[in-house]
Image (spheres, grey):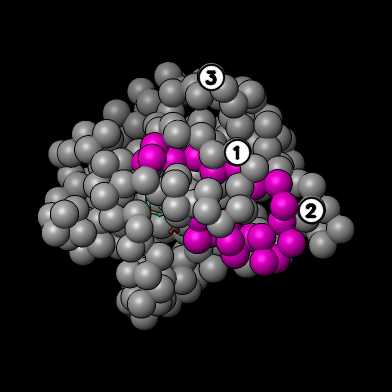
Amino acid sequence: MENARNIAFKDFGKRDGMTTGQVADVFTKVADTYDEVWTTRNHRGHIYVAEGVADYFQADVMGFVRILDVGAGTGMLAEQLWTRGFRQIDGLDPSTGMMTEAMKKGVYTDYYLEFMDGHTIGKLATDSYDGLVAAAAFNTGLLPCAALLEMARLVKPGGLICFGIPHACFTDVKEYNNRLEPLMQRMELDGMWKLLDKKHHDDFYDNANPGNVFRYIVHASDVDVKYYVEKLCHAC
Ligand SMILES: C[S@@+](CC[C@H](N)C(=O)[O-])C[C@H]1O[C@@H](n2cnc3c(N)ncnc32)[C@H](O)[C@@H]1O
């Protein structure tokens, strides 16, 4: 248990080399203390993502636009969205324990026990969502680069994808180094999405860890995942 706490909350590098299932199990083991730990450490990434989403949708549509929260965890981001007026929020996360905690909050319509990693998630149709969010989900052992491609498939053209990434992750996380940013740019060059803006924040957690909240508008959902995965490999 102590080991799981260390891996979930402190020594993120230990997740490097773990299987996706092992990472999900780590989060299951710490799920009942997850909110308390991150509230104490002043986790703010989910608040900044929620602000970015609320700032995009008009107040009169918030009740019915469909939002998918990826790497949803215990629902800290969905709670923030709910407070701002959103009511149609689905969660997606592979951890059963995180889902159990999340469902106690009553903020999700559906919660999918799935990994997002670029494979097509069969139960979710193309263009299902008006918006997609992810907070604290880009880091060692969490979402791989290819997840961006499945995100774009799930959001309607004109819809919003909004996620936060601490600056250091672009270089410190092996999976992302020289890969994540080029993929984001390549997707834009190819007309799959367009950057609306990126907003800097000084403190994603621990009153430090600066990063950006990215807001992309989806333009196309017919994603040729194989093409992009090959490009990613060339960039390795
Ligand atoms: C640090 S938590 C973030 C939870 C929540 N978004 C928040 O802001 O508190 C990361 C979550 O990502 C989930 N996760 C890990 N790999 C994933 C993947 N490939 N697809 C979706 N979720 C994943 C974990 O199970 C965990 O619940």
Above/below status of 201 relative to 35: below
Quick check: can you spot residue 7? no
Query: 10 Å neighbourhood of mark 2: few (<14), some, or many (≥20)?
Result: some
Q: Nearer the viewer, residue 217 or 61?
A: 61
Q: CA distance from mark 1 to mark 3?
A: 15 Å
**Which badge, 2 or 1, comes first in the chain's sequence?**
2
Q: Quadrant of residue 93?
A: top left
> Magenta stretch: residue 14 in it?
no
Quadrant into which the N terminus falls: bottom left
Q: CA distance from mark 2 to mark 1?
A: 16 Å
Element carrying mark 3: loop
What residue is drawn where x is 41% and y is 57%?
136
Q: Amino acid at mark 2?
A: Gly
Above/below status of 234 relative to 161: above
Residue stretch rendered in magenta on the structure: 75-96
Q: Position of residue 187 (x, y in %)?
A: 52, 37
